[in-house]
Image (spheres, rainbow, N blue to C red):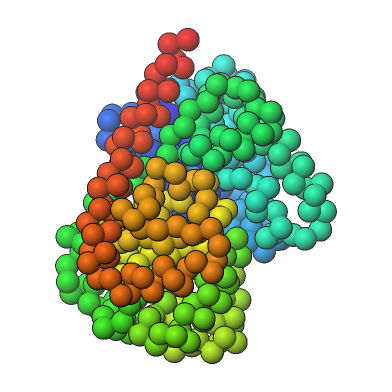
Amino acid sequence: MRIGLFSDSYRPSISGVVISVDTLAKEFMKQGHEVIVITNEHDYAEDEKNVIRYKGARLPMKGLKEYRIHKVTKRKVHEIGKLELDIIHCHTEFTIGRLGRKVARMYNIPVVHTYHTMYEDYIHFVTKLFYYPLRWIAKKYSKKFASSVDEVIFPTVKVKDKFDEYGFRKISHIIPTGIYLERFNIETYDDTKICSFKEEYSIDESKLNLLFLGRMSREKSVDVLLREYKELSLKHDDVHLLLVGGGPDLEYFRTLATSLDLDNRVTFTGMVSPDVVGCFYHLGDIFVNFSTTETQGLTYIEALAANLPIVVKYDTNLEGVIFEGVNGFSFIDDKEFIPLIEKLKEDKELVSKLSLNARATADDFSALNYANKVLNIYDELLKK
């Protein structure tokens, strides 16, 4: 099968969408399929024979500067048409997704779409102007795009339920993005590598180390985490916070930490290489997160795969991921966070139990399972 994966973002960018596309590409090729990724240019991208990149104008808004916009021209449509794709799978509703849909229509190719991002939850992080009109437009456009393809995949029930609210009535599939679980096994990394990172970032093993790993942007609620951690640190000086990742608001969060007098209690790593991300999970004792804008939350699954208990704010995307008191805890009110951390701080046996259970609950989210479920949709679509 010759498969075209269309995405506005791809390596070397780091995001849930990139992980999803990259995982499918690798797993499909392992099974003998030919895969071509169609995406936007990136300043630091390396040339790859199975990746086609298009130049475009940068978006001026903070948080969207990695993205590009450009016209869907006849030249591009015919260029992709010559690839003679059997299936087109869009992972975006915007420029590259529109290109994929246009090619599908022009050449009568079945098209699948995965809806990764709930845009209405992100608008107020990008701009405060025209919030309600833009939110309405985001809903309408998302529904319209999804209604124009042959099959739709949602990563979680949370996203499907949101589309049901939009009035979306097309038959759809719920397939969570899978990950390479072995990348997060402690056995994958030798002790020297982990110890070197602990030394580089001054990780004190005698303390309880809380870990956040993700994109440093406002919608991830890192500011809320910092403020709650401030209250925790006033009561416990043996709890440290490690924030791993880069993003558009990294300097804002650094400045906030300084204003909260947390410079000696919080460590920012900045962006880290995808090749060693799995290692960073082993620098922490508990994974923490206050975000409620995740469509799936791959970092939660990665943390579980690394045997890390998780303490995170509840959201419906966590159904089937977190099991209360089994692999971690969730909270609804932010003020529940500190008591939960204190509970784990005082009960080492409970932490050990949660850690042992964590990996088992991550096994359902393997890359192979994910790819096979998507391939089944392709096969059924091609039979029609």
Which quarter of the image is occupied by the N terminus?
top left
The residue depicted at 56 percent of the width and 77 percent of the height is 227
State the image quarter where residue 252 is shown: bottom right
In the displayed structure, 254 sits above or below 307; it is below
In the displayed structure, 191 sits above or below 25; it is below
Can residue 247 be seen in this snapshot? no
State the image quarter where residue 239 is shown: bottom left
Residue 250, position as x, y percentages in the image: 55, 73
Residue 293, position as x, y percentages in the image: 57, 53
The residue depicted at 60 percent of the width and 87 percent of the height is 259
The residue depicted at 47 percent of the width and 24 percent of the height is 87
Residue 365, position as x, y percentages in the image: 33, 42
In the displayed structure, 206 sits above or below 185; it is below
Q: Going by the image, does 116 lie left or right of 178?
A: right
State the image quarter where residue 149 is shown: top right
Give whichever of 314, 130 is nearer the camera: 314
Give whichever of 21, 318 is nearer the camera: 318
Residue 347, position as x, y percentages in the image: 28, 71
Can residue 67 be seen in this snapshot? yes
Outermost residue, top side = 384
Give whichever of 43, 346 is nearer the camera: 346
The residue depicted at 36 percent of the width and 36 percent of the height is 370
Q: Number of numbered discs present?
A: 0
